Image (cartoon, helix red, strand yellow):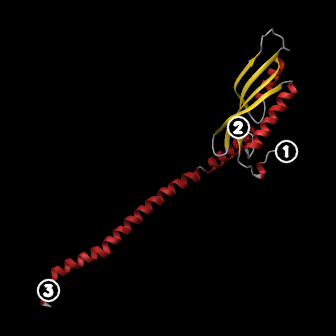
């Protein structure tokens, strides 16, 4: 026992080191981890509270976005495949130019520019012949079509112009149109024509 009392201060230091190493340090690490978790949870709570307080505004914005989506879909061709889109667009173009007495000489697709994973912009080059009234009527009809078709470039030429509305003109136009390849949900299907 006398020997233990002689080394008592060593035993106290050893016990303190063991207590610090195996009890105090793990408790401090666990405390720091809990403190970090608590801070993160408080930040999440603040964000969720802000979102919940804006729930009405977010619901209104979602409804507005859905309305805008349906409006935009009406302005685009909604064909899942490239061939369906091209066939539909060419048929629409021919049915627009034919009634105004324009004869189509050439139709050439100039290519596709992807806008996102579902929507692509297409460019179509058309050459047609007809009188001046044909050119005016065709231009007006093309600009008012739905789905939306816009002029990228246009050039109307004649061998000579004498001012007559029956004089033959040649029109070279480049048109831009958009296709949405996303398959529409049953409630979003296009109305049957």
Assess disc 1: are there few (<14), some (14-19) or many (≥20) residues with their C-alpha within 10 Å of its C-alpha: few
Residue found at x 21% / y 78%: 14
- In the picture as drawn, the residue positioned furthest to the bottom comes out as 1
Q: Nearer the viewer, mark 3 or mark 1?
A: 1
Residue 44 percent coordinates (x, y): 50, 57
Q: Which mark is residue 178?
A: 2
Whichever of callouts 3 and 1 sits on the residue coming sooner in the sequence is 3
Which residue is painted at 54% across and 54% down in the image?
A: 49
| Mark seen at residue 5 | 3
In three-dimensional space, the C-alpha distance between marks 2 and 3, rounded to whole angstroms, equals 93 Å
Task: Describe the element under mark 1 as helix, strand or loop.
Answer: loop
* Image location of residue 134, percent across then percent down: 83, 21
Q: What's the residue at 14%, 83% (across, down)?
A: 7
Contact check, label 2 and label 3, Cβ < 8 Å: no
Indicate the quadrant containing the C terminus: top left, top right, bottom left or bottom right.
top right
Q: For this view, does 6 lie left or right of residue 91?
A: left
Image quadrant for the N terminus? bottom left
The residue pinned by badge 1 equals: 192
């Amino acid at each position: 026992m006398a020997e233990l009392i002689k080394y008592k201060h060593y035993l106290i230091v050893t016990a303190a080191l063991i207590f610090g190493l195996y009890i105090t340090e793990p408790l401090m690490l666990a405390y720091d981890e809990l403190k970090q978790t608590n801070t993160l949870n408080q930040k999440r709570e603040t964000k969720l509270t802000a979102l919940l307080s804006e729930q009405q505004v977010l619901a209104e914005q979602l409804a507005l976005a859905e309305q805008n989506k349906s409006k935009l879909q009406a302005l685009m061709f909604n064909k899942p495949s490239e061939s369906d889109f091209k066939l539909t667009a060419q048929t629409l173009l021919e049915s627009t130019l034919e009634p105004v007495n324009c004869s189509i000489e050439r139709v050439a697709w100039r290519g596709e520019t992807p806008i996102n994973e579902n929507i692509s912009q297409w460019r179509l080059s058309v050459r047609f012949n007809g009188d001046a009234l044909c050119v005016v009527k065709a231009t007006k009809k093309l600009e008012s079509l739905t789905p939306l078709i816009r002029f990228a470039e246009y050039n109307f030429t004649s061998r000579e112009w004498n001012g007559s509305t029956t004089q033959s003109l040649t029109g070279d136009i480049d048109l831009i149109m958009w296709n949405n390849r996303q398959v529409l949900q049953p409630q979003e299907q296009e109305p049957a024509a």
